[in-house]
Image: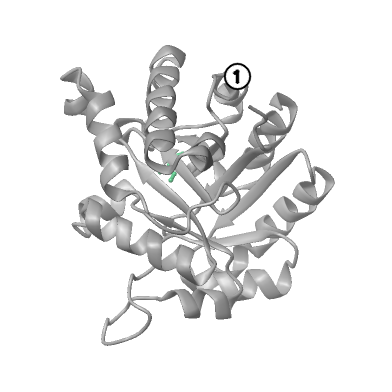
Amino acid sequence: MNKPVKLVAGNWKMHGTSADLGEVAAVAEAARALTGRVDVALCLPATLIHRATVEVPGLSIGAQDIHMADKGAHTGDVCAAMLHDAGATLSIVGHSERRDAHREDDSCVKAKAEAALRSGLGVILCVGESDAERVSGLAVPIVTEQLRASLPREGATADGFAVAYEPIWAIGTGKVPSVEDIAEMHAALRRTLVEELGSVGQDVRILYGGSVKASNATEIFSVADVNGALVGGASLRAADFLPIVEAAAAAR
Ligand code: 13P
């Protein structure tokens, strides 16, 4: 199967103000030079999305979360129309930090993914196991079930929908699963996507996330069915992020 180019997305989490727009500009310039070899996106804090899309046109700018309703009495939340208005083209949904701190369950994540796709926003849907789940030996069935239960039933396309496998114990810790464990999980996620989505599931990109750095990116990108990365800490500075982007472009 001919896979699309890899997607490398940065997740700035709750970091960054307008003082950091220079980093966005540096990523945009490098991404432009790699057009057609790798897709690049930055998922910024909601407060920065509009400024980034105005001041740095041409880079895919995403959100880190989206509400499932079109509008309404949801204090502090942001809906699809607002993200479109700000210039975002995609959103992360179901990040483990939101599943945990905001008690988002699979059905909530699924509704968010469907709301985003319905509105024409791309989606990066996150799944991943805890440390205890990995130690139990049941990570693969647990994560594939999580994917099945949070998967949007409508609107998923190979261009506009990606899955990110992010083991919770690897996020921000410097720990990374073995390439064998990444390969096993990505193969299982691929099987699940094909079972659930048919031929679209064959081409949906499956990203790996959790302590991706310049020093491990090439090895991670060499694993079958790793179609990109979702990068946290190493996406905050262009100097750390761009070597990962270049590794993805070279891995194609
Ligand atoms: P780190 O790259 O900082 O481990 O974070 C990964 C992540 O949570 C991306 O969404």
x and y percent of residue 23 in the render? 66, 55
Residue found at x 32% / y 78%: 76
Quarter of the figure with residue 49: bottom right
Q: Residue furthest top?
A: 180
Residue found at x 30% / y 56%: 109
x and y percent of residue 52 in the render? 64, 69
**On screen, 140 above or below 9?**
above
x and y percent of residue 141 in the render? 24, 27
Image region (quadrant) for ligand 1: top left
**On screen, 100 above or below 58?**
above
Residue found at x 42% / y 58%: 154
Q: Regarding mark 1 in the picture, which secondary structure is present there?
A: loop
Q: Is residue 173 left or right of residue 146?
A: right
Residue 34 visible in the displayed image: yes
Q: Residue furthest right?
A: 33
Amino acid type of the residue tagged 1 in the rendering: Ser
The N terminus, quarter of image: top right
Residue 175 visible in the displayed image: no
Q: Is residue 13 left or right of residue 130?
A: right
x and y percent of residue 135 in the render? 19, 19
| Residue beneath disc 1 | 222
**On screen, 224 above or below 69?**
above
**On screen, 77 above or below 178?**
below
Quarter of the figure with residue 195: top left
Neighbourhood count class around disc 1 (C-alpha, 10 Å): few under 14, some 14–19, many 20 upward: some
